[in-house]
Image (spheres, helix red, strand yellow):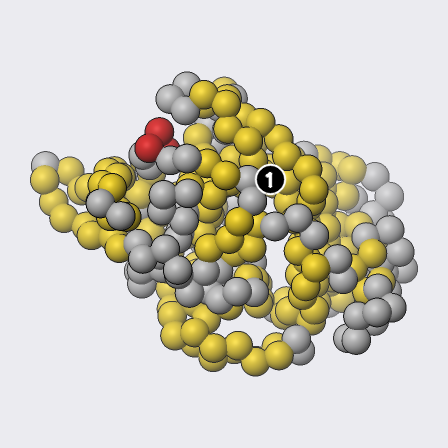
Amino acid sequence: MKSQLNKFGQKELVFTIVTFTCLTFFSGLVMAQAVDEETGYTDQFRTQDCTFIDEGENTYYILRPGYQMVLKGVEDGEDVVFVHTVLDETRMFYLPDEGWVTTRVIEELEWADGKPKEFTRGFFALCKETGDLYDFGDEVDIYNDDGTEIESHDGTWHAGEPDKNGLAKPGIFMPGSFMLKARYYQQMAEGMSMERAENWEMGLTIETPAGTFTDCVRVRETNWSEPEGAETFKTHAPGVGLLGEDTLELVAFGYNIFDRKTGKLIPQYKGEIIFLR
């Protein structure tokens, strides 16, 4: 749920040669990317040309252990709290063309009216050459209405493991260079999660309880695995990350600011106290 400026100097061009091809230029490196002609979304990436790293950042995403973002809002009449934490954990994935890739584990916890709603562990890595952040999978726990039991793991997938069309593949969660109207798959696991994004707006100034941010971007996300027409809009700020997701707004961000066991911001953090019943 975020975005920001780019320090990688990446540019992308789209042109037609029999099929659509996207070329990403970085320090003289040319990386071809194929576009699905039916949907217009990039669905093939030259990940074999990447040196993947499990720690770092691009303009709109921080992948460093201890970094946290806390968002709050009202959804369907419920008070929702969302906590994003970059953990000091890694997970390895095997891809046929790349071999073993080490990813960073991201934990996202969501409560509704103080009850667990959805807890997710995601796996991400940065392409050192382009600054693109790749999504390698999710492990999802969805709770019942009482928040007492896990009722499903819908949306769980792992890159390199079987899906309905072969093997699931990583997608770009946040590009190293933000190009307006660019379309790309974030997750490619048919039958589990086919999430895709469109760079919707840029150059925005966004006000949140955590402050006012400039040079922000907005991304429209959709997922074939969800009901037709379902969409989510996320805003991202440079050097911060996710500012908002639909009705949720950023209320706090920083390193090790939130105690995931007590559901409170640490006493040293001078911000709104969030308590999860």
Residue at image coords 31%, 43%: 42
Q: In this view, does 261 lie above or below 271?
A: above
Q: Which of 98 and 156 is in front in this view?
A: 98
Q: Horizontally, is 30 left or right of 85 in the view?
A: left
- Viewer-proximal residue among 244 and 247: 244
- x and y percentages locating residue 40 in the rendered image: 27, 47
User: Which amino acid, mark 1?
Assistant: Arg
- Residue 89 shows up from this direction: yes
Element on which disc 1 rests: strand
The residue carrying mark 1 is: 104
In the rendered image, residue 197, in percent from the top left (x then y), is placed at 41, 52
Position of residue 247 relative to residue 101, above or below, is below
Structural crowding at the residue carrying mark 1, measured as other residues with C-alpha within 10 Å and reported as few (<14), some (14–19) or many (≥20): many
In the picture, the quarter occupied by the C terminus is: bottom right
| Residue at figure coordinates x 46%, y 64% from the top left | 4
Rendering quarter of residue 128: top left
Is 228 positioned to the left or the right of 33 in the image?
right
Screen quadrant of the N terminus: bottom right
